[in-house]
Amino acid sequence: MFGRQANKVRGSFIVNGNSIKRDIRGRQDYLAASFNVQVPIWSSFDMVVNGEKSRNSIANNNFDSSSLDNEYYGAGLAWRFGKRSFAAVTINKDSKGQSQFNDSGDFDDTFVGYRVVFEPSKRTLLSYQNSRRFYGESHNFSYRKTGNNWDINVGYSEDLGSTSRLVNEAVSAGVYSCNPALTFREACIPLSGFPEIPNPSRVYFEFFDNNYLIQEVLTLSKAVNAQITYKGKKSTLTLSYSKGTQEFLELQNEAFGSEQDSEQWSVSFNHRMSRRTSFVTSVNETNVTSNGTSGNREGFQASIGLERRLTRKATGKLNIRRFDNDGNSGTQNRKDTRLELQYTYQF
């Protein structure tokens, strides 16, 4: 934006939004608008005026949707230090006010925003922005480097979204009278309730059934990710790494856990053996740590196989895949080896 056409007034007005309707949650609407105007004032300095406003409408949630809204406006200066590079500082007024997710005791509705873009060439771009959202201070960073054989991408982002999870809810199956020597449910007699005068030769239990439900919750994700790709004449090697925190906004006081920390790495390799056939292999590992009773999980997956283009629209894949998942909850432990045959046809 800055520096692309020096000594000219430039501006932008951006509107984006979405509307999603799901059976579990209902309707979710999001609308945001932002503007930015730059006016040259002297040499390589511009005056900047900016603002942003967002609105959310989410059905069947546990709090007021307006707590997720954002609104601020401000002005400042930008310094152009290259044809496509600049640094801007603005003083902004938060007109939305403090939300339930920003419980800082020293909340101030005035804040300083920063934005830096460094683009020395078309193959290199670095950008950073510091602003404010409904939860407080917000950061966004990205670095991209493109070479003849190497591509490097590093970024940090903060995103509001939603996720579905399988919830195990215990439902009472009633009270049973059992023989002390045979206390499993099938050998017991169902009762309408605990007896007022218990039989001393019997024992009484309340059994429970598992009721599995799909629950959708709002999430705030903060993650850093990095990816390095090497492209040879016939081969492609990709290394990826990510680490972040996912906060479940509607589960603040639940024992299940309101936050999850995750770390993941992966390596993939693709070699074109012929015009139609490729050798593919990949390895990835994921570690998830929860602050609640949902437990911690470790997952490992490796695959090796062949991919062949059968026709212009059809592709066949043959893979050997190994899974190894462990969790302290015990319900997600799984180890198996699979032989997979896949046929894909694109219409």
Image (cartoon, rainbow, N blue to C red):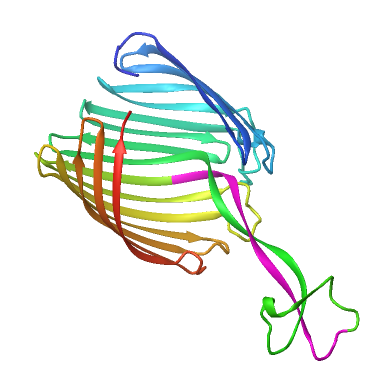
Can residue 331 be found in the magenta stretch?
no
Spot the residue most to the top: 8
* Residue at 53% over, 33% down: 111
Q: Is residue 267 left or right of residue 77?
A: left
Spot the residue most to the right: 196
Measured as percent of width and height from the top left, residue 25 is found at 62, 39
Q: Is residue 79 left or right of residue 258?
A: left
Can residue 212 be found in the magenta stretch?
yes
Q: Quadrant of the C terminus?
A: top left
**Most frequent secondary structure within the magenta stretch:** strand
* Residue at 66% over, 33% down: 66
* Residue at 31% over, 14% down: 43
User: Is residue 70 at all visible to an observer of this figure?
Assistant: no
Measured as percent of width and height from the top left, residue 264 is found at 36, 54
Tell me which segment is drawn in magenta. Answer: 198-222
* In the depicted structure, whether residue 257 falls above or below residue 86: below
For residue 346, what is the image quadrant? top left
User: Is residue 299 at all visible to an observer of this figure?
Assistant: yes
Q: Is residue 96 left or right of residue 46?
A: right
Measured as percent of width and height from the top left, residue 71 is found at 58, 27
Measured as percent of width and height from the top left, residue 234 is found at 10, 41
- Front residue of 169/178: it is 178
- Front residue of 106/178: it is 178
- Front residue of 86/232: it is 232
* Residue at 46% over, 45% down: 222
Query: How many discs mark residues in the rendered view?
Result: 0
Q: Quadrant of the N terminus?
A: top left
